[in-house]
Amino acid sequence: MVMRVYKLNIFNNKKITACKCIIREKGKCTVVRMDARKALLYKRIGEPAKKLVHCKLCSHYCIIKEGEVGKCLVRKNIGGTLYSLNWGKSAGFAIDPIEKKPFFHFKPGTRVLSFGTPGCNFRCLNCQNWDLSQAVREGGSNALGVPTTTPLQIARMAKENKADGIAYTYSEPTIFYEYAKDTVLACRKMGLSAFHLFVSNGYFTREMLQEVEREKLLAGIRIDLKFTNDEKYMQVCAAHVQIVKDNIKRVHALKGQIALEVIALIIPTLNDSEEELREMCKFVSSVGKEIPLHFSRFYPQYKMQGLAPTPEKTLLRAREIAKEEGLEYAYIGNTDLKGVENTRCPKCNALLVERDRYLIGKNVFGKLSEKERKNPKCPQCGYGINITI
């Protein structure tokens, strides 16, 4: 027997119908919000009576018992069906420069509508957005009690604010994949030409990336490479480094369809040694010397309040190492250092894009013809530049 209890939510002075579904089964009563969308990318496994599901969205590949949640805490097995509990539970809406994500080699100077949802498949002790990413872990299910914002409403926000694209960020977009996908489809239905970007920890599955590729859902993915040491990855993030490395390779293999940029937060005493920095740069360069690599300054956050901010000299040395290892584009973020966010030609060193934090000064690609945009080159020496205009 299924009963539906309807209630009204208000968003932007418009009434939206939401509801709860009460499922009665063998004397048990389970309440499921109807805005908790049925999940994608999972499989029922084992004996039907056990109602086990195997989640294939992130690389934890959780096997979830009936009534329990996965490691992300926002995907729940209810009666043998997996639900996304954070569908529609968006927070932190903002119009940002794309450089803030940071994306430096994808449509510089454009503006994106940014948002995330509660929950994450990592447990990063240093997370700067822990109040969102770890909201369910820290505050329980009440963290999901925010008003629902539908994909259509997000598409309208993007249109009304004249955003060039939408960035799924602040928390890990993989674990609100259904919501992100529905938003992409809502934008398409409205006829918006907006691009879509994931700011990701790189722990999605091959199955998710294959669907993204097949349905052309994303134009870019920025991946965090937090450490090169697996023990540190597990200690700080509760994850494995090789999975992230493999996904960097997989996204790079989609060059031309999905733009890739990599960021490394440099944390004193954890990944700031010459050896670790060189290993990181060697790996990225081995995948593609044209991949933009961002070194970001650490500030004490969440459960790492006892560490000092990253010394600027460490970041400058990291950038030098990146160049020594053959990387063509290496940047420093989260500082006031001058010139470290500019894009220069790897061959002749000509200034191509000048940046001051999130502000664009000079941009030699700003007035290219449609034909020239497809194959950007340095106007001074003709060297091909890995950038999407």
Image (cartoon, rainbow, N blue to C red):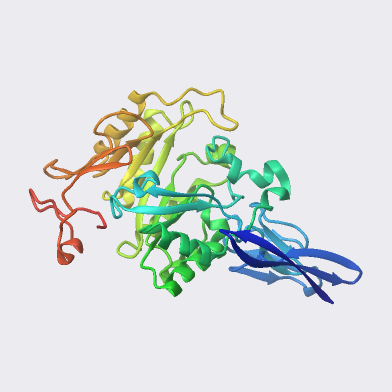
Q: Is residue 255 left or right of residue 159?
A: left
Residue 201 horizontal side relative to residue 39, left or right:
left
Q: Is residue 203 visible?
A: no
Q: How many marks?
A: 0
Asked whether, in this view, residue 90 is left or right of residue 312, the answer is right
Residue 301 lies in quadrant = top right
Left or right, 14 with respect to 251, comes to right
- The image quarter containing residue 218 is bottom left
Q: Quadrant of the N terminus?
A: bottom right
On the image, the x and y values in percent for residue 290 come to 26, 50
> In the picture shown, does residue 104 fall above or below 20?
above
The x and y percentages for residue 384 are: 16, 55
Residue occupying the far front of the picture: 13
- Which residue is located at x 90 percent, y 72 percent? 26
The residue depicted at 57 percent of the width and 56 percent of the height is: 175
Whether residue 323 is visible to the viewer of this picture, yes or no, is yes
Residue situated in front as seen by the camera: 180 or 79: 180
Name the residue: 58% across, 36% down.
125
